[in-house]
Amino acid sequence: MTDLTETVERIDALFEKATRTPWAVRPQEHDDWGIIRPVEPDDKGLRLSVAQARAVGLLSDEQLNEHRQRGTDPYGPNANLIVELVNAWPLIRQALMSGELRAFAEKIVALEDRAEELVNRYHEAGLTKYVEETMCEALEENGIDSDERLVFDLAALARTALSAELKEA
């Protein structure tokens, strides 16, 4: 894995060379789907597009017509993600370099380790059904379909497991 400082330095170099920020998605009335432009005009008074976001795969004519009728941008989520990350880079950089994000990540890793330890302990004690039910409840509480079990709130699981452990003690 690349060192965090090296990554920040690479992104800083790109940020300095890129069109000045902030950027916006489709800021002009007749912009096509996914167009990204600077909010402010350049020295010549122009706001030339800096990028056009697209989506993986082709959209059917039916899907495109639905977006036209609703007045929505099918590439908007991708364009918005790009714009938000670029515009937020100074804050992201500050958090990365100050160690706040690293400290938060370490807490999450510790929580994951603790949750895994508790889950293993419950499995060893023959409480597999309880653990599975607890995971499903955590998924449902967070509005996550049980088919998406890879994406769940570990903190909710850890809280539930810790709560149960404290009651047993």
Image (spheres, helix red, strand yellow):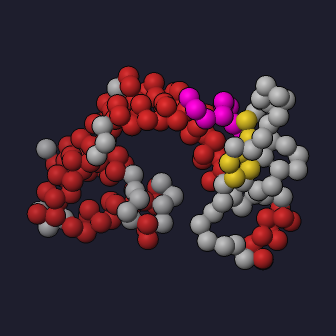
**Which segment did they paint magenta?**
16-25
Residue that appears at 38% across and 22% down = 98
- Pick the quarter of the image with the C terminus: top left
Residue 20 in which image quadrant: top right
Whether residue 139 is visible, yes or no, is yes
- The reply to whether the magenta stretch includes residue 130 is no
In front of the other: 35 or 14: 14
Residue 128: percent from the left, percent from the top? 21, 67
Answer with the quarter of the image where residue 109 lies.
top left
Task: Decide if residue 123 is on the left or right side of residue 49.
Answer: left
Vertical comparison of 114 with 129: above or below: above
Q: Residue furthest right?
A: 29
Name which residue lies at 43% across and 66% down: 148
Vertical comparison of 108 with 72: above or below: above
User: Does residue 19 show up magenta in the picture?
Assistant: yes
Residue 5 versus residue 90: which sits nearer the camera? Answer: 5
User: Residue 27's x, y, as percent?
Assistant: 80, 41
Does residue 163 show up?
no
Q: Position of residue 65 (x, y in %)?
A: 82, 71
Q: Which residue shows up at 30% across the image and 37% down it?
A: 3
Going 66% across and 73% down the picture, which residue do you hit? 58
Q: Residue furthest left?
A: 124
Measured from the top left, where is residue 118 in percent x and y? 19, 52
Q: 6 left or right of 74?
A: left
Relative side of 40 to 8, left or right = right
